[in-house]
């Protein structure tokens, strides 16, 4: 497992932007698939975006076209740039890492499933006001 620490959340008006960051411990960050999930009050945790160790990228339909996930392996950091934010984007955003080791997955969109991930950060609050 790796230790993950998110930052960059905050309060923003609708239509605004935020960039979330997630720093990871360890020397093999480049071998991990990384994901962003979010959880609003009273709702289940939902997938937002993921980037594999090969930098294959996948977005949830709810954020596609408004968000960009990226990684900087030299800094052990994954980012989530969110634009055109909406009140319904309000949630705690969590960063997650899989088991590493350049794992290959089969099936339909495995990186969108929380069960794929072994490590989770503590979350960062994003609040979008209308």
Image (tube, rainbow, N blue to C red):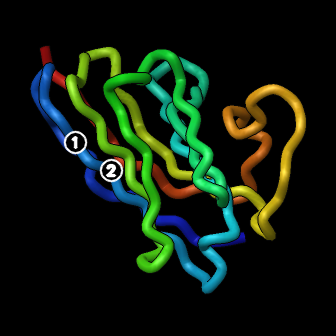
Q: Is residue 83 above or below residue 2?
A: above
Disc number placed over residue 98 in the picture, else none: none
**Mark 1, secondary structure of its residue:** strand
Q: Nearer the viewer, residue 85 or 10?
A: 85
**Mark 2, secondary structure of its residue:** strand
Q: Quadrant of the N terminus?
A: bottom right
Q: Does residue 102 appear to the left or right of 71 in the view shown?
A: right
Dots 1, 2 in contact, CB < 8 A: yes
| Residue farthest bottom in this picture | 27
- The residue that disc 1 covers is 18
Q: Quadrant of residue 16?
A: top left
Q: Residue at x 52, y 43 (%)?
A: 36
- The residue that disc 2 covers is 20
Percent across and percent down for residue 121 are 53, 57
Percent across and percent down for residue 64 are 43, 23
Disc 1/disc 2 C-alpha distance (Å): 6 Å
Q: Quadrant of residue 46?
A: top right
């Amino acid at each position: 497992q790796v230790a993950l620490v998110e930052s960059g959340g905050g309060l923003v008006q609708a239509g605004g932007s935020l960039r979330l960051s997630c720093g990871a411990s360890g020397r093999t960050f480049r071998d991990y698939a990384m994901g962003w999930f979010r959880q609003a009050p009273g709702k289940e945790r939902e997938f937002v975006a993921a980037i594999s160790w090969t930098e294959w990228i996948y977005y949830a339909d709810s954020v596609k076209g408004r968000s960009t996930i990226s990684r900087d392996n030299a800094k052990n950091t994954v980012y989530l740039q969110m634009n055109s934010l909406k009140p319904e984007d309000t949630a705690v955003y969590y960063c997650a890492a899989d088991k590493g080791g350049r794992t290959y997955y089969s099936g339909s969109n495995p990186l969108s499933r929380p069960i794929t991930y072994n490590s989770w950060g503590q979350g960062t609050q994003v609040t979008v006001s209308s």
